[in-house]
Image (cartoon, rainbow, N blue to C red):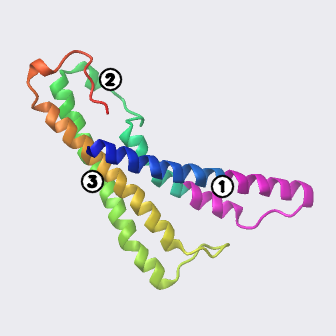
Amino acid sequence: MINKVLDKATSVVTIIASVLLILIGLVVLANIIMRAIFNSPIGGTVEVVQYGMMTCAALILCRTGFQKRHIAVTLLVDAIPKRVGNIFKTLTSLICTAVFAIISWHDFTEAPNMAATGRTSDVLKLPIHYLYIIMAVGFLLGALVFLYWTIVYAISIFKPAAEESPGNTINK
């Protein structure tokens, strides 16, 4: 049940990030065309790319973590017994949960400060606090994903040996 909710939520933010990435690409393309044909680039293109990519990354990391498509060096984990490997996976997932939660908390608490001071981007004067809120949501969802994996791996540590079979991996 929880994995289905996380699957749906991470799918939605992935679609949002994908649309944002397409929009960034269109802005860059329009900038190139405007510069080449009219010798008049679109002001703020660099800013759109910087803030857009930062937001895309914050949103897509939760899906990457949920699908376990992040970079993992499994040389050590593959060489040790499965139960010990699951202990390492539990600990690393717990660390990821903490890091994502801290970043999310920081972004959620910093957004009101940015709004109160009227902080905007340099060129386009976009309100920065909205970016903090969007990124905070992405990192919060990432924290929930890694918490889910922490629990899954922790439970697998205590499974009876009969339930564990060679090649039995924990996937959704």
Residue 170 image position (x, y, % from top left): 27, 29
The residue that appears at 55% across and 75% down in the rendered structure is 127
Compared across the picture, whether 27 is left or right of 164 comes to: right
* Residue 120 at least partly seen: yes
Res 154 → quadrant = top left
Question: What span is colored magenta in the figure?
Answer: 24-53
Name which residue type carries label 1. Leu
Give 95 or 132, whichever is nearer the viewer.
132
Give 10 or 94, whichever is nearer the viewer.
10
- Please check the rendered image and state whether residue 135 is part of the magenta-colored stretch, yes or no: no
Name which residue type carries label 2. Leu
Res 41 → quadrant = bottom right
Which residue is disc 1 drawn over?
Answer: 23
Residue 80 image position (x, y, % from top left): 21, 21
Which residue is disc 3 drawn over?
Answer: 98
Mark 1 or mark 2, earlier in chain: 1
Residue 153 image position (x, y, % from top left): 20, 36
**Where the C terminus falls, by quadrant?**
top left
